Image: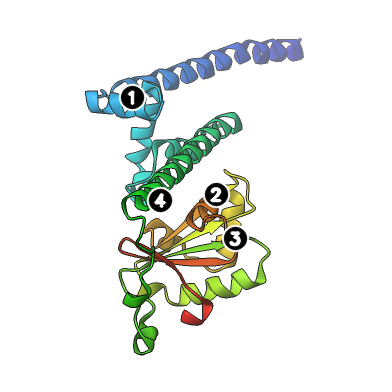
């Protein structure tokens, strides 16, 4: 009889606990929804959300995340899609933002290359009889030691599993303080394979701080080498951008 009473008492207690937990979840959900709704979006916020193809709910979540540690440790140029992807709540959401970012990057590469082709065409039309590089204006032997200047930016095209590329990138990184920055373009990688890019950068001693400050940028090639060299460039390939001029650098000049 005592066992029966005890069993009944235990069975009767479980619905009470379940009700309390359910009510707690409802309260937490309502509180989270209230906090999100409390963030009023300005017309500027709404316009920016539309530019990034994000809903008002997504934009509010982005603002909340940037108000925390993400906003404290990330560069001001980090995109809303990256923020939401980094803080994805499940794999499906992470994949959604990863694909959005991959499409955005691919479209940006297409725009850059289209403009570069238009620029090349304009130069040929406006200055048909002038060489791209005036040999007479190149520095003589006495100035060859200053192949790099503090305002120069270097464009280096490399690929994974390339010993020659590895030697060159190490030499470039040793001189990072002598130039404005180094833009690295990786070939033979699928667009959006950020894990492979991070692994390559880590294995070559590229500091995260360099990337955050854009002293070093990591890019997919996306046809850039072919466009800049009229299809003649072969990896590894090094270019120096000095002002408006772009010229090839040899390993011996490093």
Q: Residue furthest bottom?
A: 142
Residue tagged by mark 1? Answer: 35
Category of crowding for the residue at label 2, using alpha-carbon neighbours closer than 10 angstroms: few (below 14), some (14–19), many (at least 20): some
In-front residue for pair 5/170: 170
Tell me the residue at 52%/57% (across/down). Answer: 185
Question: SS for tag 4?
Answer: helix
Q: Position of residue 64 (x, y in %)?
A: 35, 34
Q: N-terminal of the two: label 2 or label 4?
A: 4
Q: Nearer the viewer, residue 37 or 118?
A: 118
In the rendered view of the protein, which quadrant contains the N terminus?
A: top right
Give the mark nearest the N terminus, 3 or 2.
Answer: 3
Q: Position of residue 106 (x, y in %)?
A: 51, 40
Q: In the rendered image of this protein, does residue 2 appear above or below residue 191?
A: above
Disc 3 marks which residue? Answer: 200
- Real-space Cα separation, disc 1 to disc 4, in angstroms: 52 Å
Q: Are marks 1 and 4 in contact (CB under 8 Å)?
A: no
Identify the residue position indicated by label 2 in the image. 223
Helix, strand or loop at mark 1:
helix
The mark nearer the N terminus, 1 or 4, is 1
């Amino acid at each position: 009889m005592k066992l029966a009473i005890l069993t009944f008492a235990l069975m009767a207690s479980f619905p009470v606990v379940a009700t309390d937990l359910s009510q707690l979840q409802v309260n937490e959900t309502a509180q989270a929804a209230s906090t999100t709704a409390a963030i009023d979006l300005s017309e500027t916020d709404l316009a920016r959300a539309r530019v990034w193809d994000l809903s008002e709910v997504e934009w509010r979540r982005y603002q909340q995340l940037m108000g925390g540690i993400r906003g404290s440790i990330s560069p001001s140029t980090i995109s809303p899609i990256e923020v939401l992807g980094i803080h994805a709540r499940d794999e499906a959401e992470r994949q959604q933002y990863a694909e959005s970012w991959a499409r955005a990057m691919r479209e940006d590469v297409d725009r850059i290359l289209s403009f570069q082709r238009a620029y090349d065409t304009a130069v040929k039309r406006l200055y048909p009889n002038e060489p791209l590089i005036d040999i007479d204006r190149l520095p003589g032997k006495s100035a060859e030691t200053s192949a790099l200047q503090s305002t120069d930016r270097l464009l280096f095209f490399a690929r994974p599993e390339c010993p020659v590329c590895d030697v060159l990138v190490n030499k470039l990184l040793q001189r990072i303080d002598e130039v404005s920055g180094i833009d690295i373009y990786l070939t033979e990688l699928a667009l959006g394979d950020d894990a492979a890019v991070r692994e390559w950068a880590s294995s070559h001693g590229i500091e995260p701080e360099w990337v955050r400050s854009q002293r070093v940028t990591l890019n997919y090639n996306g046809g850039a080498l072919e466009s800049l060299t009229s299809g003649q460039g072969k990896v590894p390939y090094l270019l120096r951008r000095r002002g408006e001029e772009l010229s090839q650098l040899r390993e011996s000049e490093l």
